[in-house]
Image (spheres, coloured by chain):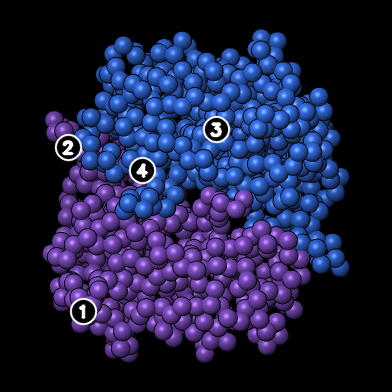
Chain colours: A blue, B purple
Amino acid sequence: MSSLSRRGLFGIGAATAGAAVAATGAVAVGGFPVSEAGAATWSRPDVIPFPGRNQAGIATPVQDRMHTVAFDLTTSDRAAVIRLFKAWTDAAARMTAGNEVGEGAIPGVNEAPPDDTGEALGLPAARLTLTLGLGPGVFESDGKDRFGLRSQKPAALIELPRFAGDKLDPERTGGDLIVQACADDPQIAVHAIRNLVRIGFGTATVRWSQLGFGKTSSTTPSELTPRNLFGFKDGTENIASDDQTLLNQHVWVNSSQDDEPAWLDGGTFMVARRIAMRIETWDRTSLIEQEQLIGRSKGSGAPLGSAKERDKINVAALPPASHVRLVHPDSNNGHRLLRRGYSFVDGSDGLGRLDAGLFFIAFCRDPRTQYVPMQARVASQELLAEYLVHTGSGLWAVPPGVNTADGYWAQPLLEA
Amino acid sequence: MSSLSRRGLFGIGAATAGAAVAATGAVAVGGFPVSEAGAATWSRPDVIPFPGRNQAGIATPVQDRMHTVAFDLTTSDRAAVIRLFKAWTDAAARMTAGNEVGEGAIPGVNEAPPDDTGEALGLPAARLTLTLGLGPGVFESDGKDRFGLRSQKPAALIELPRFAGDKLDPERTGGDLIVQACADDPQIAVHAIRNLVRIGFGTATVRWSQLGFGKTSSTTPSELTPRNLFGFKDGTENIASDDQTLLNQHVWVNSSQDDEPAWLDGGTFMVARRIAMRIETWDRTSLIEQEQLIGRSKGSGAPLGSAKERDKINVAALPPASHVRLVHPDSNNGHRLLRRGYSFVDGSDGLGRLDAGLFFIAFCRDPRTQYVPMQARVASQELLAEYLVHTGSGLWAVPPGVNTADGYWAQPLLEA
């Protein structure tokens, strides 16, 4: 184990760093602590443990900010992908522990570019999580068995159908890989993505990237439910991050029950949809109509006809075309999603309006039964749909977590 | 005085709001408290006072997040501009006090759109500031004296010259008006801008909008100096928010000394530049070269040759083409800027890279002497310039603050 920490780089002494974070120095070169000895690294309150049966960033209490990037692989060499994922895993373990990438500057050899880009120096880990997903292109590309992995393709890693209202921009859709970075400080999320992009140079190229400034879903029922850009509380009935029963039922793949390859055990599927919201039209809609479209009271978040946000929902009592009614498990054969979306504002739309909306992220065990039927119904039936335009989309298989000191992301697949 | 607060809208009772903010109810309809009685509103730690001799958001300790929008006016009627600025002032005073826009839903009349869009309900004021600037188009447009204000045009509200390296996108440049929203919570900044856009519907249209996820300059020397996306500490020698001597010398217009109209007394000028940073090239540059280009040590932030970040800078000892040397007051006849910029990531650039950079914001008393010569020198002489592309630009005259209960933004100009 080396004794590096975020403030060990570029010759910063502890005395000048001024950060509140204790230097743990527990991240090993080429691996990370899963042992008892290393456990201290992962027990700090600002750190979400990187090792685990499942990847972090899914059943993790939702952080405030998000930067997600989709990559295309520019290689057809499986060994190059393995090298990339090993390097990314090492960097991800370091960064989520609040450390910098690499070993830092070695005195006298400053002629090399720094191992870390530096903009997170002195900052805490901010509950950073990094979550990797694999798109269809990892298994097959233009009909070719690109990396010899075609036989390992998950059954549920389908091409999403075209939904009513889709206006998908190819430059915001798909990607061989996706990495979701979430943190309570956007500088930390951006730093992490930027360093993975840097490490990927020559092997993976950025297809698109999306910043989310504010979470719209919580997985922590005890905290204030966040509001989306329609001004409504969203995801009140989301799966809680500590509800193992619901997580096992709706999120984690189990190959003994599911028609999926064994490497995906403990993994899941990630759906991402960039949804532009016609907020200027919404803002001229009456309060009563807004509430009928959503199915909740705007102020309290209570289902219409109820008094409190968490009152039990009787879907039959809600307007038939309301959002809450149509997405409720009672309208979806009991199916649920773990929602983890973020609001965005990407400048203006060239027509004098803000380009704002929801970057929808959901995790589920089988998108064919959990996401597709729900989205098909919502897109064609809910009246809210006229305020929404889906401009980006993608589905990725999310491998399980890394659980051994020399393990790396997607190892069970890549060494299959 | 009405007794409205952020949680008074849409029928939310105090018992269900769950926010940590006390309801002060001190914002009056059609005005705001400048009296002793209303002072309690502005003394809360999460609130930056809206009233004052100068607008807030300039000599205010820099908040973490930013959303800035430029508008074009779609009217040629001065009375319509006055109505807009009155409505904006009322909304800005309410929102900066942590309240919602307007009086909220009136029982039984929910057929109207809500006065406030709602997404900040339950959240604290988060030190929100809103700062208005007036572009050249307010005084003259296509050679026309559009609002009868041509004679009041500030002498220093010039057309910025073209600098070396400028690749300005017209859709990210200029604008009749600019509003800078800064807050410690991006949801609060976005909510404020979005509501001003909503109120401006029919009078002002969005020209461009820019989110900044992390401040790159501090005006509080006691706090950790933030780092920009080059990974370097930036603006160590910035003007401190409480340094009245430097503020009077370099920021606030004084018509008895400056060749400016009296309505601009206590105002200033705002320069904004969207600077794309070639981070992928930077990340492959050696540490020693990075430090030579900047003129500081990457780790400590100390000027090259010194030990500590705040050691006195001897410009003659720095590399001749280094950034710190060229922007230092000793290289600029003692001129200084108040810098208040933010990092951005706006998706990807279509070439497989992140579209990232610095949204540079600076306030100064006379851009002709303080900004233009410095930027001309930097753009043509600093070696760092090859990593930078200026893609957006603008200069605005920032009127003084609003200091009377029935006052409004730019009143001394519009009633001149």
Mark 3–mark 1 contact, CB under 8 Å? no
Residue drawn 65% across and 55% down? Answer: A120
Q: Earlier in the sequence, mark 1 or mark 4?
A: 4
Give the Cα separation between the discs numbered 3 and 1: 53 Å
Q: Earlier in the sequence, mark 2 or mark 1?
A: 2
Q: Are marks 2 and 1 on the same chain?
A: yes
Q: Are marks 4 and 2 on the same chain?
A: yes
Kind of residue indicated by mark 2: Ala
Residue B252 placed where, x, y %?
Answer: 36, 78
Task: Check the residue under mark 2 and report the chain it is in.
Answer: B
Looking at the rendered structure, which numbered label has been put on residue A394? Answer: 3
Give the Cα separation between the discs numbered 4 and 2: 20 Å
Instruction: Label 3, secondary structure: give it.
Output: strand
> Is residue A36 shown above or below B359?
above
Mark 2–mark 1 contact, CB under 8 Å? no
Task: Check the residue under mark 1 and report the chain it is in.
Answer: B
Which-is-in-front pick, marks 3 and 4?
3
Residue where numbered disc 2 is placed: B112
> Is residue A198 shown above or below B311?
above
Which-is-in-front pick, marks 3 and 1?
3
Give the Cα separation between the discs numbered 3 and 4: 30 Å
Residue B218 placed where, x, y %?
Answer: 52, 66
* Quadrant of the rendered image containing residue A380: top left
Give the Cα separation between the discs numbered 3 and 2: 38 Å
| Viewer-closest of B15 and B335 | B335
Residue where numbered disc 1 is placed: B150
Give the Cα separation between the discs numbered 2 and 1: 39 Å
Residue drawn 55% across and 83% down? Answer: B377
* Quadrant of the rendered image containing residue A183: top right
Residue A169 visible, this orientation: yes
Instruction: Label 2, secondary structure: give it.
Output: loop
